[in-house]
Image (cartoon, rainbow, N blue to C red):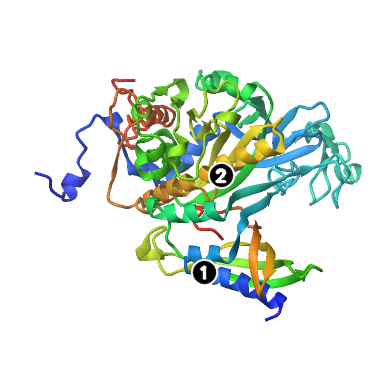
Amino acid sequence: MARSRNHEQWTSPPPFTSSEYVDSRIYSDQEIFEEELEKIFKKSWIPVCHESELPEPYDFRTVTIAKEPVILTRAKDGKIRAFLNVCPHRGNMLERSPSGSFLDGSPSGNPRHITCMFHAWQFDMKGRCIYISRQEEGYQDRLKKQQMGLRELKCEVYFGGFVWVSLNDQIDMTVEEWSAGSLAVLKPSLDEEPLEVFHYHKAIIPCNYKLWHDTNCEFYHDYLHYHNRITGFNDAYFARKNTGFDNGHINVGSFEVQYDNYEGSHSREEISFPHLPPNHWYMIDMFPGVNFNLRGSSLRCDIMTPLGPDKVMIEFRGLGLKSDDAVTRRARIDHHNSIWGPFGRNLHEDLLAVTGQGAAMNPRAEKRQILHGRHENETIHDENGMRHFYEEWGRWMDRMPSNPDKPFAESAGA
Amino acid sequence: MSSADAVRDSIYRSCMYKDDMEWEKWLNLCDEDFQYSITAYSPEIRNDMIYLSGGRDEMLGMMKMLPKHNSDHSPLKRHCSVYTVDLEDDGATATAVSSVVVYQTQLDGINCHVDAGSSNVFLVGRYFDKFRIADGVAKFVEREVKLDTRKLDKGTHYPI
């Protein structure tokens, strides 16, 4: 007989293996959060923006990884490089604008240079220190410009022009190797011709970053979305596969979305991305918090920047083909934002749901066991994607997701 | 009522109708060929963006679908000041620029026991409107809501 539960029953393990649920403390604990920044976000590859956001020499873009300010520059040689956005003199943040060009001078410095406004130290696009104000007077021959370059970070442009950065000098794999095949399903579509970002907005949400990643990894929550139920929920939808890859990444397989079933919505067939069957929809979720989501005519990318155990910044980008004419671009924007914009049908619903999870998971709240135990032959409502993620998370953190006080042990199915 | 007053009257009424979620009444202030959009300039990607757009019927259809969607029902209130009204020489058309600040009063968006009843600034921007004037009535033919705010957190299903 169905019944409610008392404390003991509520906090007892569910009738699952330990890989099929997690302790909600991993979504709220400050110590675990700080450890995640050190062990995961400072060690892996993170895509931070798209190359179209700094298209010309001397363009720059500023971002944050694991609380570290990062600046990306495009030098005269066309190469994009990444540096800590920190002056080596007194630790001031070098550039405070989200993006721009160093072609013009700044009040404290010359054109074509990164200038620290504080004491006018200047650097070039390759991170070399090229000017120290009153250098000889103050430092005599004790300090040379050659010793004061910026801290350069590993940086690659890969997968349709996304810019990836790692704070880890010792990372022993390329982005391609890191992706472990998870990007292959969309690579032909994204690499066929240059892409361009047409949409950007951000949300700072009071929930743990993993809750947003979970939502991107599982489609059982399509019960939340009227749009997805009415345009999906047929045999082809329920046959979509969730596939795990090394390093904690997953793919969600495609099917043909019936856009016409939603009033006011139309087929995306005429402006599908290259090599993508009409109205198909693929999803890639990369460890630890990145999502690529291609719905026929427009690509969405979510990049998560954890700000605290209960706070995450999510940057939402929409991309089309750089060669788009005005009419095509407008159609892509409409397709993207009618679902995924800040006033769109689905994104608001997803954000509402995770906000509710965050609000119900205080650090000292009575333990919740978050269930990832659905098995449906690794199809769309199976929760194997989340299980795959948490297996990887446990490995990097050396903590059991179901009991984070215990060291990690491989699950039987791993 | 002068034509300029008719323009102001339509702008303020549109705010009240939207505040009260009287979507049909709002759209009745608009001509058949009305076009609505919410736009913003992103200094991140250094481009103009269109967050939402649609004609009169599309907006009405979208609003009628809301009961089928899960939404944050926290009401939005628009504080609007009409800055300029410029009448064309033909006397039949006008443009107007207004400042708008939208406040959100929490209802069911987060934890209602703690948050319900608190108000916060949801967004800041301007209305750029175009009107057709006939028989002393100014009907919207175009509204562009140009946002300064780009960190919209949960967002909303409601037009601004």
What residue is rendered at 47% in x and 66% in y?
B22
Position of A152 with respect to B124 (left or right) is right
| Kind of residue indicated by mark 2 | Asn
Please give the chain letter of the residue carrying mark 2.
A
Q: Nearer the viewer, mark 2 or mark 1?
A: 1
Position of B64 with respect to B31 (left or right) is left
- Quarter the N terminus of chain B occupies: bottom right
Residue A337's label in the rendered image is: 2
Instruction: Name the residue furthest left.
Output: A1
Q: Secondary structure at mark 1?
A: helix
- Where on the picture, by quarter, is residue A369? top left
What residue is rendered at 69% in x and 33% in y?
A324
What residue is rendered at 28% in x and 20% in y?
A412
* Vertical side of B67 occupied by A398: above or below: above
* Vertical side of B119 occupied by A16: above or below: above
* Circles 2, 1 touching at the beta carbon (< 8 Å): no
Marks counted in the figure total: 2
Q: Is residue A144 visible?
A: no
- Where on the picture, by quarter, is residue A297? top right
**Residue highlighted by disc 1:** B17
**Which of A198/B14 is in front?**
B14
Is there one chain holding both mark 2 and mark 1? no
Residue A67 appears at what percent x and percent y?
Answer: 58, 43
Q: Secondary structure at mark 2?
A: helix
Graded by Cα atoms within 10 Å as few (under 14), some (14 to 19) or many (20 or more), the crowding at tag 2 reads many
